[in-house]
Image: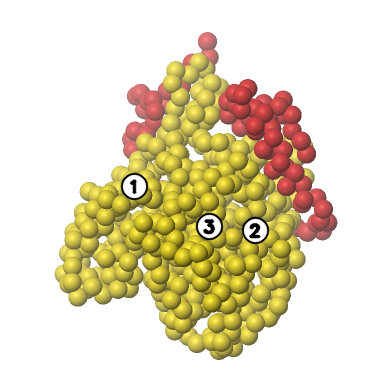
Chain colours: A red, B yellow
Amino acid sequence: MALENADIENIALLARLQVSSSETNDYANSISSILCLIDQMQQVSTDGVEPLSNPHDATQRLRKDEITCDNQREAFMALAPAAEDGLYLVPKVLD
Amino acid sequence: MTNKTLVQISKDLTAGKYSSRELTQDIIADIKARDSIYNSFISVSEELALKQADAADARINAGSAELLTGIPFAHKDLFCTQGHATTAASKMLANFVPPYESTVGQRLLSAGAVCVGKTNMDEFAMGSSNENSYFGAVKNPWDLTAVPGGSSGGSAAAVAAGLVPAATGTDTGGSIRQPASFCNLTGIKPTYGRVSRFGIIAYASSLDQAGPMCKTAADAALMLNAMAGFDPQDSTSVQQETPDFTADLNRPLQGLKVGLPKEFFGPGLNPQVAQCIMTAVQQIEALGAQIIDISLPNLELSIPAYYVIAPSEASSNLSRFDGVRFGYRCDQPNDLMDLYCRTRAEGFGTEVKRRIMVGTYALSEGYYDAYYVKAQRIRRLIKDDFTRALSQVDVIMGPVAPTPAFDLGSNTKDPVAMYLEDIYTLSANMAGIPAMSTPAGFVNGRPVGLHIMGNYFAEAKLLNIAHQYQQVTDWHLQTPPSNGIPVSNQTKGAE
């Protein structure tokens, strides 16, 4: 399946990636060739085959809803590119 | 000193031939002196390492040492190390210092091992050549014009060059086994769920597994003993008892049934690599094994299915890098959308962005069933192939990669050509079975690895076979030329 430049722009937006106009063409070509490879899957019938999402067919293990570690708020907030008074700073969202 | 095995270093430390501090200092000095040739390290953690070495020396002197106590190793830079930068070889995390340690790292530290630094890799573990690193490509110590493999290429090059005696790796589609094969090492990808993923930066969570990269099977068993085990902090960690992986190393191979899948020996395989593998298989047969032809009919589908599932999971996992909570942030964003889009555009490299976009597309409305669910159905076909084959045979053998290490730059323009290199390794991750590479010869001075795959939780059997093979061969003992220029253009493996 061949992707157009407009498809790349749409996918990039969904993926929250800025793609410059000079890159769009390269991505359209390389991702189209990857999709061409991926389309080999359609040659085989998988009717009646259950999808496998975990190699052991395991389901998510749940634990008791208990506190198991100390609050690490300060350690984690110290990693933020911009934070103040215990809040993450981002550009203004509401006018 | 670092061409010694973990087993030898452990004996030396216990005998007091040198201290862990002396060894650690030597190793760090050697990395500083020689790694400019290979670019296998992203960072060295000298201060932390010397503290760990002093603590190890105290344990050794107190008689409370374990086998790994005092032994230096390196972590792939995908493992979070508390207080020391962890980059995933990405600009996105170039300045990230984790506030916690991965479970694997904690286990190795508890055993007394000394982490000397973090190794180079493909960015976020996406690649088969270690050319997708923000910190530059890694060179193969066996031939400086060749790639070391990927994504754990720095770990492989560092151990092969004798800079460290062992390193951790991760394997999502072959990222331990292929660089081990390209650099003449013993590397094992354990069963999915055997080793905790907690604190390892996620690429494709249903496929990722961590494992050791060492010089010998005995070393890999020793290191896996420390790394493996149930972890309540990883929801896919398997609640299985962890055996002593060294216990079966000396078991004879009499009666072992080895399957050779015809799909591993098709037209894409380099004939000289095939010759090395067949010679190795004959040697294993001579040790008492029975060789049986088998088939894994859906092998070829592992490439398209993997390149849907892995990018899909990656696009989800990497959505956390948003420039808000940690990691890189673009300068002067206009608004929130600009902050997200520009941070991610500037922070991620081309291949990472490409896989995020492929995954985003595969998971998007209208395509989810045709791509993602279809790939998961094929994933079951691949698992069923292995289940069927492994009811007939004990283990499966073949090549790790279709060629020896390829030249730097030879596949960088064409992502599909690079993906096709993964043909023999992807299926073990898709099925979740353990698989390893052990040195099996050379083609034009570049190493070739024998691929051994087994049933779920059969790591001890794989290590046993590799160890027995290493008792009758000396490929694993060979060390690269000090100048990185291959000494021979002969096909040694076929002799």
Q: Where is residue B324 in the image (x, y as percent from the top left)?
A: 45, 29
Q: What element carries label 2?
A: loop
Does label 2 lie on the same chain as label 1? Answer: yes
Whole-percent x, y for residue B443 in the image: 53, 65
Mark 1 vs mark 2: in front: 1
The quadrant of the rendering that contains the N terminus of chain B is bottom left
Label 1–label 2 contact, CB within 8 A:
no
Number of labels in the image equals: 3
Q: Disc 1 is attached to a residue of which chain?
A: B
Q: Tell me which amino acid carries mark 1.
A: Ser
Q: In which quarter of the image is residue B486?
A: bottom left
**Label 2: few (<14), some or many (≥20) within 10 Å?**
many
Whether the residues at callouts 3 and 1 have beta carbons within 8 Å, the answer is no
Please state the chain letter of the residue tagged with numbered disc 3 in the rendered image. Answer: B
- Name which residue lies at 80% across and 50% down: A42
Q: Which residue is drawn at 18% across and 61% down?
A: B22
Residue B233, percent from left and from top: 46, 54
- Circle 2 residue: B423
Mark 2 to mark 3 CA distance (whole Å): 15 Å
Tell me the element at label 1. Answer: helix
| Mark toward the start of the polypeptide (1 vs 2) | 1
- The amino acid on which the numbered mark 3 sits, given as a three-letter code, is Ala
Tag on residue B405? 3
Q: Which residue is labeled 1 in the image?
A: B36
